[in-house]
Amino acid sequence: MTTLYEPTTASLEESLLSALSINEPWALIERFTTLVRESGSEDERVSAEYMAGRLKALGVPFKVYEPDLFLSVPVKSSLEVGDKSIRAKSPAFSISTGPQGITGKLVSIPSLYSPRSVDLFDVTPASDADVTGKIVIIDGYGGPPPVRLLEQKGALAQIYINPGEDIHWGICTTIWGAPDLDNYQRQPRSAVISISRPDGEALLKQLEAGEVEVTLFTEMNEGWMKCPVIEATIEGMEEPDRFVLVHGHYDSWDVGIGDNAVGDGTLLELARVFNDHKGQLARTLKVAWWPGHSTGRYAGSTWYADNFGLDLARNCIAQVDIDSPGCRWATEYYDVSWMTEAEDFCKQAIKDVTGLESHGERPHQAGDYSFNNIGISGFFMLLSTMPKDMLAEKDYYPVGGCGANIAWHTENDQLEIADKDNLMRDLRVYVATLQRTLNNPIHPFDFRRLAAEFHETLTTYSQAAGDEVDFSPAFDALSALDDALNRLYSHSSELMAKSVSDPAVRAYNDAILELGRSLILINFTREGRFRTEPAVKIPPLPDIAPAMQLQAASGHERHIIQTHLVRGINRVTWEFESATKSVVHALEKIES
């Protein structure tokens, strides 16, 4: 009997796997070594034309869109201390200082940054020091949370000391994609730079000896720019309206081979092999390449989520993000991003095609996960990575891509960061997960796992809040949902033996999609459907996460948190109840 996670069309999967070749992706990778693909640049357009040309030659149907994206591209930056000039880079969305720069007294404050932290951009200043009118120097990458916090505290400008000798490009805005009326006020108003560890330590030593005055210079190219978005569509034969979206960004810092030319080549090869087998696909595969990832905070994928939001909400089964696969020394699968309902499915597929065990985590508020506010199940972002003992041996600090190679977001991300064998192995993982989602009769997501996680989360929050807040409506609604889910999944084996077009199968799958539309929304968003979230860490069930701060609060703040929790419990409870109704409605059709 085929389980929920095994291929029902094993011969097709084997044909797809056998058809994989390194030739197409490697040709793209080599071509991209000659292109600095900054969004809005001529090289980005040349790279888009290359991919469009290859799709046309391969006979893959595609469209090219030309949206206006709001971007911030660093041009040049420096730091002057006396008569010495220090090398620096600015993250996207720093302000430009003008030729006069910004001069001020330097103040050092500690941070919660750890060289082994996985939340690279969530470093928070660990000091209440007065930074008003001063230039702050602090460890970290200069991501959105600390930049915004120090700006609110009145810092004149900000300097971040990167962990190593190289300086990493980044982005410091909390705005996800293009700004709108709800969030444009959050655009940074600080001049921000990053410097190397040796230069940072020398500057800190100088500061220990006495007062230091510095001048920052930053120049940014900011504004609305036309950038190509490429979408290939390989239509399914049985249920063409339903689709899987597999995607990744093609803009880069410098030539960006590990981030993300390897992903772009992977997407092209996936388009090729699935198009060659299109007559055997039950559902539709959409393959998309995004601009504006690094200089627009996922501007390309957010534009797509905005402009195709209704179709995505009605018909998208899953979104699969491909970023930095197939990199040098990346031979293991841990810290892989997947939503809880997709965990068992992803583990099974990875084990089946690589023989390796895998371990995952809740997706970070990062990558091109621009579809959470629609409620679409997602898996993968980064995939294979370097073994931990190798990281320790090389004394590498965490980075956000390139298979953990510290060439990430630097000029060193060159051809040697890509690895043909690792890329082919990762391609096998993508083929297996996509093929099974496209062709298995029922969608491979187990929301019982998510319900169990919700119970743990509710228990943690309710215990933290104590008796002052009544969590019982949420617990009761979750219990009813769990009962309905157990009934629904009891039919999974019999439905796996039916065809994709069977009415009972369709009813089951409709319920799976509706579960995601409700439950993902409350687990990953605060702003609601079709909106965007700030680019900061979001805890599970964020509407009621402030329960963790209730007992430490007093007076006015305590009442505010209590009010917030009552409203949050209402939202969570309502979505549990709505999800239960969707399941019961499906069961009426399945069991009739």
Image (tube, rainbow, N blue to C red):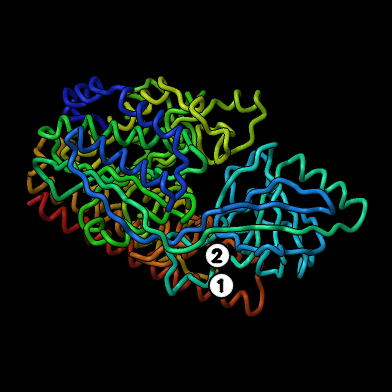
Q: Is residue 389 visible?
A: yes
Position of residue 366 relative to residue 29, above or below, is: below
Q: Which quadrant does the N terminus fall into?
A: top left
Q: Position of residue 155 (x, y in %)?
A: 72, 66
At mark 2, the secondary structure is helix
Task: Give me the residue at 9% from left, 40% from top.
Answer: 237
Number of other residues with Cα within 10 Å of mark 2, as a class: few under 14, some 14 to 19, many 20 or more: some
Q: Position of residue 572 (x, y in %)?
A: 39, 64
Q: Residue furthest right?
A: 209
Q: Is residue 122 visible?
A: no
Task: Give me the residue at 43% from left, 26% from top.
Answer: 357
Q: Position of residue 13 (x, y in %)?
A: 21, 26
At mark 1, the secondary structure is helix
Q: Amino acid at mark 1?
A: Ile
Q: Residue furthest bottom?
A: 556
- In the displayed structure, does residue 85 sit left or right of residue 260? right
Which of the 4 image quarters holds residue 87? Answer: top right
- In the displayed structure, does residue 99 sit left or right of residue 408? right
In depth, the one of 327 and 443 nearer the eye is 327
Cβ atoms under marks 2 and 1 closer than 8 Å: yes
Q: CA distance from mark 2 to mark 1?
A: 7 Å
Which of the 4 image quarters holds residue 305? Answer: bottom left
Residue beneath disc 2: 546
Position of residue 127 relative to residue 34, above or below, is: below
Q: Amino acid at mark 2?
A: Pro
Residue beneath disc 1: 561
Task: Give me the residue at 28% from left, 46% from top.
Answer: 245
